[in-house]
Image (cartoon, helix red, strand yellow):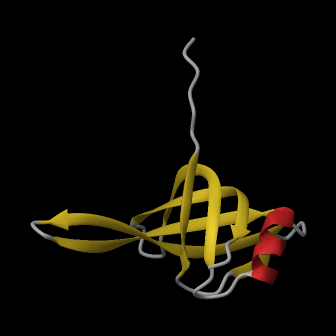
Amino acid sequence: MVAKLNRCSFIGNLGRDPELKYTTNGQAKVEFSIGVDDSYKSGNEWKSNTQWVNVVAWGNTAEQAAEELKKGSLVYVDGKFTQRSWDNAEGVKQYRTEIVAHAVQQLVR
């Protein structure tokens, strides 16, 4: 069998304040998004394109992120890539791609 790896790391700025919620069984869950710049050269000019990454964290990681981070914070996120789906109220399938964070650390500029 071939070993497989689902791991990704990002450094970016929070696009909004973290949203902390608790499940019915008391498990902490936080969601936020980070903007990650992708720079490239076009002719003699450097251009930047921001990609938005959805992040979710659970448990102590969630509570710590909600306490320490705010919109604009520079943050390092390490986790795994996931995609989930659900049917909305009109019965249309919706998709969300996100990173389930194992580690979230605020960086100092």
Residue pictured at 90% horizontal, 69% vertical: 26
The image quarter containing residue 16 is: bottom right
Q: Is residue 6 above or below residue 106?
A: above
Q: Where is residue 20 in the image (x, y as percent from the top left)?
A: 75, 80
Residue 45: where, in percent of width, then height? 16, 73
Q: What residue lies at 55% left-to-right and 51% top-to-bottom?
A: 82
Q: In this view, does 67 lie to the left or right of 84?
A: right
Of 70 and 32, nearer the camera is 70
Q: Where is residue 67 in the image (x, y as percent from the top left)?
A: 81, 82
In percent of the image, x 57 and y 11: which residue is there? 1
Query: x, y percentage for residue 53?
Result: 49, 67
Residue at the farthest top position: 1
Furthest-front residue in this view? 44
Q: In the image, 67: left or right of 35?
A: right
Number of numbered labels in the structure image: 0
Residue placed farthest to the left in the image? Answer: 43
Towards the viewer: 54 or 103: 103
Left-right relation of 70 to 64: left
- In the displayed orientation, state which residue is furthest to the right: 26
Residue 21's quadrant in the figure?
bottom right
- Quadrant of the frame with the C terminus: bottom right
Q: Which of 67 and 43 is in front in this view?
A: 43
- For residue 31, side relative to residue 36 (left or right): right
Q: Is residue 82 above or below residue 2?
A: below
Q: Which residue is drawn at 71% across and 82% down?
A: 69
